Image: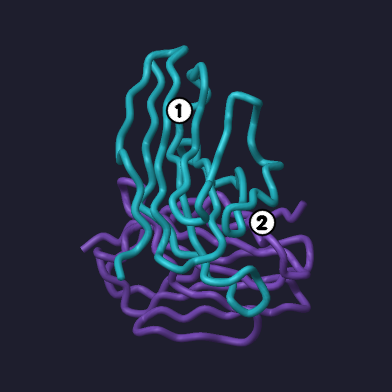
Chain colours: A purple, B cyan
Amino acid sequence: KNEVEQSPQNLTAQEGEFITINCSYSVGISALHWLQQHPGGGIVSLFMLSSGKKKHGRLIATINIQEKHSSLHITASHPRDSAVYICAVGGVGGGADGLTFGKGTHLIIQP
Amino acid sequence: GAGVSQSPRYKVAKRGQDVALRCDPISGHVSLFWYQQALGQGPEFLTYFQNEAQLDKSGLPSDRFFAERPEGSVSTLKIQRTQQEDSAVYLCASRLGRGGRTYEQYFGPGTRLTVT
């Protein structure tokens, strides 16, 4: 079973700061997902990566397959970015591909 | 059309009751997943359907948990004789394809189950 570790578990920052959340996993994967979860449970998919880097607005996600590591960056952070950010990985070989999740990073951006 | 929907959004059950949680995936999505998220934890895989076939149920915690997707669209997760440890958010996700390059899963809002 893949082990997914995220750091930090909790992060409080001031508005405007550059935010980095890290994710590492133990077994080769087919794809890595970054998800955002707001209070109340709803999950939104931010990125799906299998290599390189993706950018969407103020969010940037990178992955290093050799090092089994990914980072999620938020530039010019804003209080509305406050949420839990979850890293999840899918197994190799296609098939069912049920995701294995990290425990999440609870981010609070203070005005 | 619309995204993945789940009902009810909130369910309170007395210990020992049976509950049924419904998931409506995105129309045309072949794959459907159920996950369980305990308070303060990341979600954990429960079961997977490809159309109407349940291909993986390795994550179901006990034989009190049962899932079905009889017509390959709507799915129901049933929990019999609920216990307090079943209290969690139950998330449903759907995916267009079986796997390969179509890996993105779309999540529903979840059903928060509280067993008292």
Above/below status of B10 relative to B99:
above
Q: Residue at x 45, y 86 (%)?
A: A55
Q: Residue A41's spot in the image, x, y percent?
A: 36, 48
* Helix, strand or loop status at disc 2: strand
* Amino acid type at image mark 2: Val
Above/below status of A59 relative to B51:
below
Q: Horizontally, is A60 left or right of B116 in the view? A: right
Q: Which residue is mark 2?
A: A4
Do circles 2 and 1 both sit on a common chain? no
Q: Residue A1's spot in the image, x, y percent?
A: 77, 51
Q: Which residue is mark 1?
A: B87
Q: What is the CA distance from the residue labelled 2 to the residue labelled 1?
A: 23 Å
Badge nearest the viewer, 2 or 1: 1
Q: Residue at x 68, y 60 (%)?
A: A96
Q: Residue at x 37, y 58 (%)?
A: B4
Residue at the extreme left of the image, as rendered? A111
Q: Residues within 10 Å of mark 1 (few under 14, many from 20)?
A: many
